[in-house]
Amino acid sequence: MKAWLRVAACVAAAGTVAAAQDQLSAAKDLYASAAYEEALTTLTRLHEGGSGGGASDQVEQYRAFCLFALGRTSEAQSVAEALITASPLLEIDSADASPRIIAMFSDVRKRLLPALIREQYRSGRAAVEKKDYPAAQSQFTRVGHMLDEADKLGVKDDALGDLRVLVDGFAELIQSAQTRAAAPPAVASAPPANLTADAATTAASLPAPARIYSGMMDGIVPPMILRQDVPQLPKELVGMLSGGTKTTILDLVIDENGNVERATVRQSTIRMYDTLLTNATRNWKYRPATKGDKPVKYLKTLEIIVKSGPGESPSIER
């Protein structure tokens, strides 16, 4: 008897879904024929009855379309907000909606995305703290797609750039953790074979790399700073400091044109901040070091003091 009831319930549910699909199709036809009021009545009935089935998103989209077409813009925007909050990357088919409706959805998405991205990022952080790395990876991948969408829409929010660096940093940490967990025990490898005669000849024929100078050696005049802006520590990273003062040691190779050719973090404070810092060095500029009157490459070492207090900015010791 119970089995019969379950079968009957499944059949009834399937019939309900089929009926909802038929009503949705009818509402779409009414919308296409510009019978917006009639279409909205059908869609509202589906919405209130919760019988949209797997097509509930389409029900809500067409409700927004009808409301917009009827001049009920604020109501249409409210429906769009609910849809985008639930599915930030929801795509609206241009075959179903006018350019004005698509623009309305884009405006709503542009307004909501910064907060939605931060919320998704916090979910990823929470999963990392629980060591639920598959869930964290999924969350951060989604954040990355949302950041791409924000870039495409021209969202103006400087903090999102830092957030992208943090997301990439966490993704790298997750990958490293998963790789370590899956790695087999280390096996000592044999020392590399000697170069063959041909390889040795080829290596000898390559030009020697330019010498890199440092300090005051050989009468070198060190580079002079023209632009060296240290990035702020994002708020999201402040909580990762255990308090007090931390030091990041950064080695820079400054080329003969005064540009940073290479930036290497020798001592790290927070891995994600290292990425922000090394990215920033691409825009640093110096008057190049010289030997006599000739510009030369130069190795410059900076100690960057990072403090966890509110309003504290990283500073360069040397």
Image: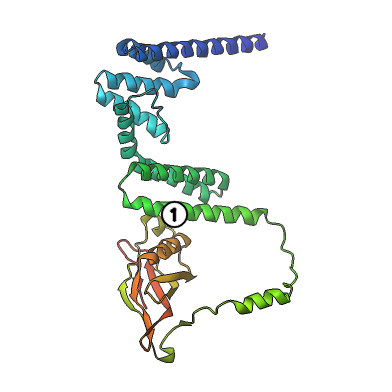
* Residue drawn at point x = 43 percent, y = 62 percent: 273
Is 252 located above or below residue 17 in the figure? Answer: below
The structure residue drawn at horizontal position 30% and vertical position 12%, both measured from the top left corner, is 37
**Residue at position x 34%, y 71% in the image:** 285
Between 309 and 106, the one lying in front of the other is: 106
Q: Is residue 195 visible?
A: no
Q: Where is residue 206 in the image (x, y as percent from the top left)?
A: 58, 76
Most distant residue in the bottom direction: 219
Task: Determine which quarter of the picture holds residue 223.
Answer: bottom left
Residue behind mark 1: 166
Most foreground residue, 185 or 31: 31
- Kindly give the residue lying farthest to the left in the view shown: 71
> How many numbered discs, if any?
1
- Quadrant of res 90: top left
Q: In this view, does 171 lie to the left or right of 153?
A: right
> Which amino acid type is marked by label 1?
Leu
Q: Which colour scheme is used?
A: rainbow
Q: Is residue 45 above or below residue 314?
A: above
Residue displayed at 36% across by 11% down: 30
Picture coordinates of residue 126 (x, y %)?
48, 47
Indicate the position of residue 21 as horizontal and vertical percent values: 48, 14
Quadrant that contains the N terminus: top right
Q: Is 211 placed above or below 57 here? A: below
Image quadrant of residue 213? bottom left
Q: Which of 289 and 180 is in front in this view?
A: 289
Q: Is mark 1 on a helix, strand or loop?
A: helix
Rendering coords of residue 274 (x, y %): 45, 64
Q: Which class describes the residues within 10 Å of circle 1: few (<14), some (14-19), or many (20+)?
A: many
- Work out whether residue 284 can be spotted: yes
Q: Image quadrant for the C terminus?
A: bottom left
